[in-house]
Amino acid sequence: MPAQRTRAASARSGTAATSSEANSAPISSRSAAAARSRVKASTAASYDTLYVPWPPRRLALALATLALALPPATALGAGPGGGGGGAQSAAQRLVETYSPRLMIRAQEDPPCDTNEEQYEATVVETVLGNPTVKLTREGPGKKETAVESAPSGRDVATLDEDHHLNLRGDPLGDTCVYARDFARLKREGEAPAVAYAHIARERGRPGLAVQYWFFWYFNQFNDLHEGDWEGMQISFESSDPLRALEEGPGEIVLFQHAGGEKAGWNDGKVEKEGTHPIVYPAAGSHATFYDSAVYVENGRQGSGVGCDNTTAPHTRLDVKPILIPTAADPDGRFGWLTYDGRWGQKEKGFNNGPTGPATKTQWLEPFTWAEGVRSTSPRLPIGSILGPTVTTAFCGTVADITSFLNTSQRAPWILWAVPAAFLLLIGLIGWRTRWRPVELGELRRRRAFGQLLLAGGGLYWRHWRAFAPIGLTAIPIVGGVTALSWLVTGGDNGRRLDEETGVSGLHVALGEIFTSISLPLTATVVAAAVIVAIRQIDAGEPASFGSAYRGVWRRFRRVVGGELLAILAITAMLITVVGIPFAAWKYVAWLFIQQRIIFDDVPVRAAFRGSSDLVRGHWWYTLRVAAVLAILAFVAGPILGFALIFTTLPLILINVVGSIVFALLIPYVAIGETLLYFDLQERGEPVRAGRWRQRLKRLRRRPDVAPAPGRAA
């Protein structure tokens, strides 16, 4: 590091903290200062900080000599004060006995892959004394001024919330700057893995809580910000460290954003290695969890909003516990604990840097705070029955929305321009079409775009006793195909090769094929039944669930085979990449294959040709209607599910609701496309073919040729 950088001795490491901007509601600077003064009288004086140029050899030599000269009770991190004795030794042994093992997401593409964990729980000296960090102060009129470069722990001690530690980089810009800086600090040995251990007690409550605070260099989550504090606490019934060692813990609480999750020490979900709990910090957000999973957070009880990912592969991180005091001496080596400012750059809202641990409720009230945290964290269910998975869509949507909000911080006009453009587009679509009247007595007629959408809904509602059961049959069809895949692959979703159970590469391939065709096959069968029902209604016959599927069965090979053949052909075009435009063209041109087969009773080849002829000249109009119908089908379930996520319903039930909504909308899409089919038929012949097409037709005509002399005509 540069020679001008100043640091405390390597022993000078200690911090307590909370999650990004939370882990609990911050208490005011005045109350925090008062609390520190109350406890200070009962706390021994802290070690003074050594300030020397970095990195001198004499410092290392002097520290080694000092460590050898000191008795064990006063060794590095022995306690909150400088006094020796059995109590200090017991406190150190207590925090070492129960220090956690962190399982962080492994970096497979370092250092800029934000889906992996780019940082480690480390010392505050990665920021304090760092020449690339500036201490700033927000003055009158929200104007920010630079106070000092490379601020030390003594420089920031007792400063109020108007101060910020500004790291090199922009949290709303290229965040890989932070990842590269931290990687460099690790290479240079300046970022050891530590946890700041705080023995917390609460006035009027027996017992103690050992809190482990983790400082992270950057928060790479939805709420991008510099610096991050997360942690956990382990509670004991005894207030004495020595007796706590003998009796053992009773409860463990993991800090997660502005809340947490608690469990009994002997609870099955608490993974341990001897006395050391194994915990899983989420990639980027660093919220701490009990297991490897994706957790869906809906903001209840301070859980944050979004999805925390703790899944494999993992890298194990054994943190060294450093004991810190409850009330630090501002002039001592833990003076930075009295800093009430922000551990990151000043930004608006959730992009602002977080405050430190001593400003958090659980710092002085660990037991009262723990009573209000959750006992479970909802996990992302694996897969869905049918259609888009609501919870998975929620994760992606929240990430996209927060990314949009982060971008708007630097370009505020985007915040109103994008919604305004979207509303303008919707308004133009609604204004340029007719919505009334909606005639259902005669199905074969021309309809404007808006009339077609409303007529589809009206026809569905009028005959819901037939259409709704037809739509719901999509669920058992998908279930049957999934069960067949399960039987073929031995219940391992097509990912396992096992000679003993006979699951071979062929089984895996078949399982993947079954899984990939389940939705297209289901939509094909259900849509065919809906079209048969519309044919019956158009003929003046009563439509029913049974008669619709009987009509499909009589044409099953043509109806299902023709549609699957079109899907395979379009997929083959997409795979070639260069064929993507042709795939889009043919997708629209072949939209009415099933209608041709069911209404005109033609062979598959004639159905392909007839659908293309019908769409010719109306391709863009057909695309617009088909796209809107598809969007309605795919977004309705997730939108409803998003609202349900913010309730107390189980996530798996929310996914089931989304699947049911999707299944019920398959008939609406088929009705809309069939009404479009009638509309195009009523529009008459397509526009005249271009000159090049007419020339091709003339070339195909064979001219009359006179018979050769001597041959019969």
Image (spheres, rainbow, N blue to C red):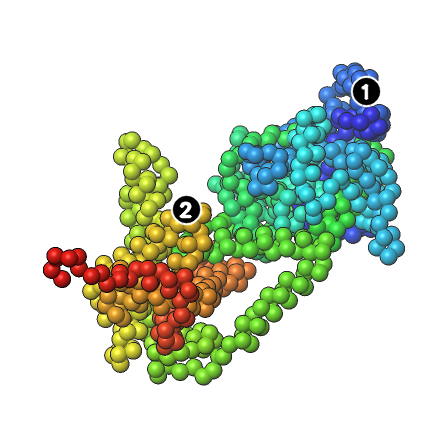
Q: Which mark is residue 340?
A: none
**Residue 133 coordinates in the image, percent (x, y):** 79, 38
Instruction: Classify 595 as above or below 500.
Output: below
Identify the residue position indicated by label 2 in the image: 575
Is residue 515 or residue 673 the one in the foreground?
673
Disc 2 and disc 1: Cα gap in Å? 61 Å
Q: Which of marks 2 and 1 is nearer the N terminus?
A: 1
Q: In this view, does 589 lie to the left or right of 307?
A: left
Mark closer to the observer (2, 1):
2
Residue type indicated by callout 2: Ile
**Residue 208 coordinates in the image, percent (x, y):** 66, 40
Is residue 103 or residue 424 the one in the foreground?
424
Report the quarter where the N terminus lies: top right
The answer to which image quadrant residue 614 occupies is: bottom left
**Residue 568 coordinates in the image, percent (x, y):** 34, 51
Report the quarter where the C terminus lies: bottom left
Q: Residue 56 carries which label?
A: 1
Q: How crowded is mark 1: few (under 14 residues within 10 Å), some or many (20 or more)?
A: few
Which residue is painted at 55% across and 37% down in the image? 105
Q: In this view, does 390 lie to the left or right of 285?
A: left
Q: Residues within 10 Å of mark 2 (few under 14, many from 20)?
A: few
Secondary element type, mark 2 = helix
Q: Can residue 52 be seen in this view?
A: yes
Instruction: Classify 590 as above or below 70.
Output: below
Which residue is painted at 72% across and 28% down in the image? 190
Is residue 708 or residue 434 the one in the foreground?
708
Which residue is painted at 34% across and 82% down in the image? 442
Q: Is residue 388 left or right of residue 443?
A: right
Residue type indicated by callout 1: Pro
Instruction: Classify 157 as above or below 91.
Output: below
Secondary element type, mark 1 = loop
**Residue 480 coordinates in the image, percent (x, y):** 29, 53
